[in-house]
Image (tube, helix red, strand yellow):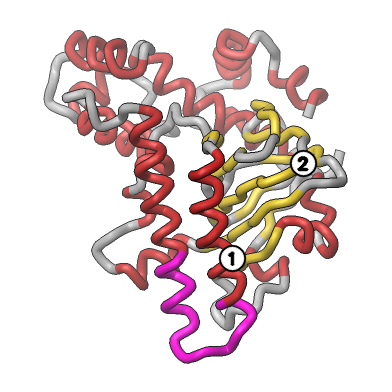
Amino acid sequence: MKKLPVYQINTFNCQSDENDLYFNDFKSHLINHDFIELSHSHNFYLLVLFTNGSGFHTIDFTTYEIQPNSLFILKPGQVHSWQLSEDIVGFIAFYSQEIYNVYFGKKQIDEYSFYRDLKNSPEMKLNDLQTQEISNYFNLLLKENKQNEFRKTDKLLNLLDVIHIELARIYESQQDHNLHPYNFKIKELEQLILSNYKTEKSPSFYADKMNMSLKHLNRICKNVLDSTLTDFIYAKIILESKRLLSTNKLTISEVADNLGFENYSYFTKVFKKYTNLTPQSFKKLV
């Protein structure tokens, strides 16, 4: 098995001088970049909206059905692949965290909740009206991207941000993320896990960092996420282990070491507990 490719935006011959933006209609994108149908990851954000056609989109080892009104939002590092019908139609956008955060200053891209939630789905199902509204903004992006007008990058980034705002409104209404009083605590926990999961796997570490009892933090996780704190921590660890194993770059022992496990056998035990597969079996499947 070949090493899993990690693509950069300039792989796709984008027109932006910064090589931090790329916009295209999906059919044109496929003509020159059919290699994207094979499993790969990126070092940038990806947004894709399908308006026609069908297929399957596998993201971090979960497969989603593609149909009209399907929208997918991917973060850097997520592993994905496509199976697409010949009549597939839609829009696709690539953008780096750097260009977005530098341009908007105080507003950071990961403040949008569909990027922050560890348990969120990368899939959004729009209705016909929502798809039409988002398509209109994409058409404006494509039109501006083909021209060389004054302050082109400014307009592209602001149109991209309008799409983010519209999607955030849809996402919040679908997921009810703002309704739970402990939502801000879950966001704090997510950031702590993302920063410490390789070295700290004990639930008590995160409870201490958040200045609350382990019992109380577990209760919050159960009420908001329907998950124990331990399972929430290990969801991130298992996902990262799958990503590392799928690249075929590291041995299983190296993956275990990279994720802070003391030995190969304990990593294997934990991996099998959460996936019902050994790491060796998983590598053969991907």
Quarter of the picture containing the N terminus is: top right
Relative to residue 123, is residue 146 depicted above or below? Answer: below
User: Which residue is drawn at the image coordinates 56% and 12% (left, top)?
Assistant: 274
Q: Quadrant of residue 102?
A: bottom left
**Relative to 247, 117 lies left or right:** left
Viewer-closest of 113 and 133: 133
Query: Residue at label 2?
Result: 53
User: Which residue is drawn at the image coordinates 15% and 15% (left, top)?
Assistant: 213
Q: Amino acid at mark 1?
A: Asn
Query: Residue at label 1?
Result: 139
User: Which residue is drawn at the image coordinates 62% and 11% (left, top)?
Assistant: 272
Main secondary structure along the magenta-highlighted residues: helix
Query: Range of the magenta residues?
Result: 144-159
Q: Amino acid at mark 2?
A: Gly
Q: Is 154 in the magenta? A: yes
Q: Is 141 in the magenta? A: no
* Image spot of residue 91 (x, y percent): 65, 56
Quarter of the picture containing the C terminus is: top right
Viewer-closest of 258 and 96: 96
User: Which residue is drawn at the image coordinates 38% and 23% (left, top)?
Assistant: 201
What is the CA distance from the residue labelled 1 to the residue labelled 2? Answer: 19 Å
* Image spot of residue 108 (x, y percent): 32, 57
